[in-house]
């Protein structure tokens, strides 16, 4: 069983959009913004909402992808291959990169990972930050 | 606490896409309650991982783009949420009180569509098999 634990939105004003979700819904920052980037990672404590930097206008603004967390990525890959016979999907590059990108049959972009997007950077550490 | 609990995708082949999520990721169909698109020519599917709802919405007439459509937030206090929204937005319109959809459809300041609901996205359509896998 895989679980939806991540949504990502592209925006050309990530600070303003993140402020909206913090102030209206009480979401908080789940992990620090990588140095030199503008992407902001928020959470409600269970699901992560990533506000992706799109300042160069290289993508459409809006819903970009969602993320699934799985306990067993190899078994999940096998199931995906059975569900989409003949369609090649990316596989994890090494034991330290237990994640991959794929598209569903309609072309929606999915980020699949074992570690998830919150667990490897505990939410509690950032729970009181605004 | 307000919670992200819903994501909706539009497609012209809802059965095929729902089968993918059931087979590849073990999602289950929410079998009970009102499925808003039952009256449509093509059926929409409401799936869940036990916590989060994934709605596969029929887009057979191709009246809208296929793809990621909106997401949903279960809110604790709608009046307080609307009050906060109104400090950012000029106008917030509520749906009728007896709607089987989320009570409120709004967009964020970038135009991303959101459904807001106090009753939630699974609670009014109980998952028959509980939390066990498919």
Image (cartoon, grey):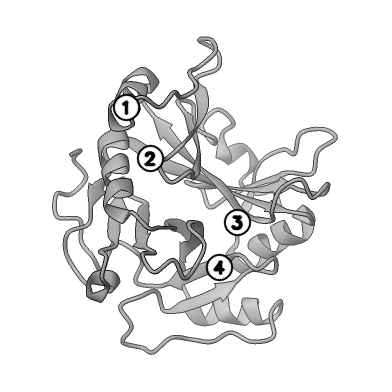
Asked whether B36 or A114 is in front, the reply is B36
Q: Which mark is residue B134?
A: none
Residue shown at the point (36%, 18%) measured from the top left: A74
x and y percent of residue A95 in the render?
50, 10
Q: Which mark is residue B113?
A: 4
The residue labelled by disc 2 is: A3
- The residue labelled by disc 3 is A27
Q: Secondary structure at mark 2?
A: strand
Q: Nearer the viewer, mark 2 or mark 4?
A: 4
Q: Earlier in the sequence, mark 1 or mark 3?
A: 3
- Spot occupied by residue A14 in the image (x, y as percentages of width and height): 76, 53
Mark 4: few, some, or many residues within 10 Å (few <14, many ≥20)?
some
Answer with left or right where residue B57 lies relative to residue A36: left
Which chain does the residue under circle 1 lie in? A
Q: Rate crowding at label 1 as few (under 14), some (14 to 19) or many (20 or more) other CA atoms within 10 Å.
A: few
Residue A85's disc number = 1
Asked whether the viewer can see residue B2, the reply is no
Same chain shared by disc 1 and disc 3: yes
> Could you say whether the residue bearing mark 1 is in a helix, strand or loop?
loop
Task: Give the SS element for disc 3.
Answer: loop
Query: On the image, which quarter does residue A37 sit in?
Result: top right
Q: Is residue B83 visible?
A: yes
- Spatial separation of the CA atoms under disc 2 and disc 3: 20 Å
**Position of the C terminus of chain B by quadrant:** top left
Query: Same chain for marks 4 and 1?
Result: no
């Amino acid at each position: 069983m895989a679980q939806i634990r991540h949504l990502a939105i592209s925006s050309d004003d990530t600070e303003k959009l993140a402020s909206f979700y913090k102030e209206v819904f009480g979401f908080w920052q789940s992990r620090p913004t990588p140095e030199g980037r503008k992407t902001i990672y928020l959470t409600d404590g269970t699901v992560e909402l990533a506000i992706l930097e799109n300042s160069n206008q290289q993508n459409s603004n809006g819903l970009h992808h969602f993320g699934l967390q799985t306990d067993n990525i190899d078994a999940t890959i096998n199931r995906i291959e059975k569900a989409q016979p003949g369609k090649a999907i990316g596989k994890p590059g090494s034991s330290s990169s237990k994640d991959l990108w794929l598209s569903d049959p309609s072309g929606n972009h999915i980020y699949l990972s074992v570690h998830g997007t919150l667990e490897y950077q505990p939410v509690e550490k950032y729970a009181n930050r605004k | 606490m307000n919670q992200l609990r819903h994501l909706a995708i539009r497609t012209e082949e809802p059965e095929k896409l729902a089968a993918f999520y059931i087979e590849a990721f073990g999602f289950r169909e929410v079998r009970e309650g009102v499925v808003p698109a039952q009256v449509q020519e093509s059926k929409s599917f409401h799936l869940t991982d036990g916590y989060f709802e994934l709605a596969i919405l029929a887009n057979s007439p191709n009246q809208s783009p296929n793809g990621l459509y909106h997401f949903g937030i279960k809110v604790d206090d709608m009046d307080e949420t609307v009050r906060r929204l109104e400090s950012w937005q000029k106008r917030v319109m509520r749906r009728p009180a007896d709607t089987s959809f989320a009570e409120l459809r709004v967009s964020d300041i970038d135009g991303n569509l959101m459904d807001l609901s106090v009753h939630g996205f699974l609670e009014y359509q109980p998952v028959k098999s509980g939390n066990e896998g498919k």
